[in-house]
Image (cartoon, rainbow, N blue to C red):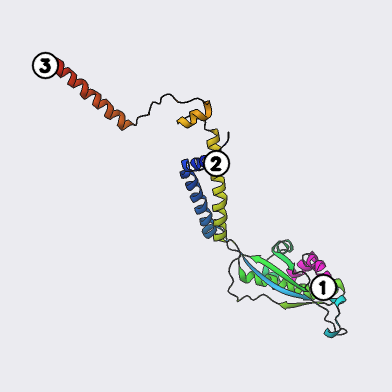
Amino acid sequence: MEFELKDYIRILRKRIWLITAFVVVVSMFTAMASYLWLTPVYQASTKLIVNKTNENVAVAQLDINTVNMNIRLIDTYKEIIKTPAIMDKVVKEHPELGLTSAQLTSQVSVSSVNNTQVMTVSVQDPSYRKATEIVNAISLVFVQEIPQIMKVDNVSLLAPADPNKAAAPIKPRPALNTAIAFIVSLMIAVGITFLLEYLDDTIRSEEDVQQHLGIPTIAMIPRLKDEETKSYATNVTVIRGGEKNVKAHS
């Protein structure tokens, strides 16, 4: 069965109510869930710089080889910061956080920009203040422990997280969620519309007869609505009554 553009438009117009209702319901539900039911999550971050800091090497003596070595070390530090060697130390030194080593590991993430010596340590939590406490604690312990683990003192805290910052939650994002729900629900509704049209083999018009049977339509019997049927029955009764009266006078 081949469809032209006008056929697609006709199919969509025929079930426009289904498409509209489905999209509106899904979009409204997503918006309500994002605003009312989902818990806001905040993110706090610190900046760590990987750079030689001991007294034997001055800043002016740092050459390109040293910088490249520090950059390559960042990949190693990303893994070390999530190990029990760091997290167990954080749990021990900061019992006020009330978190286990595994919970800390699941909340922390580490990233870096290519060809830079800066690492970003981030923590997500429903409370922004607690997120700042956790990420600052992890960063400080990491700076303290890395000289013992790697036998080199080249990590320092560049920018701690500020607990007094007016932070906005990073998720949920109601506007983005609603927009995504609108697009996805529209695609699903259109797909359902064409599926229903494909499964519907009812013949309703002359075009359907010609398309399915390949023969012309000789005549059509219209379907009358209830009010039209009642009106027709009343008219027939009146006519028959008139005929009886005429015969009686004859």
Instruction: Say which mark, if any, is on residue 233.
Output: none
Is there a contact, CB below 8 Å, between mark 2 and mark 3?
Answer: no
Could you tell me which residue is drawn at 64 percent across and 70 percent down?
Answer: 130
Compared with residue 194, is residue 108 higher up or lower down, i.e. above or below? below
Left or right of 136: which side holds 4?
A: left
The answer to which of marks 2 and 3 sits earlier in the sequence is: 2
| Picture quadrant of residue 112 | bottom right
| Picture quadrant of residue 38 | bottom right
Looking at the image, which is closer to me, 167 or 135?
Answer: 167
Residue indicated by mark 3: 249
| Badge nearest the viewer, 1 or 2 | 2
Looking at the image, which is closer to me, 247 or 111?
Answer: 247
Magenta-span inclusion, residue 219:
no
Residue indicated by mark 2: 192
Left or right of 34: which side holds 106?
A: right
The answer to which of marks 1 and 2 sits earlier in the sequence is: 1
| Badge nearest the viewer, 2 or 3 | 3
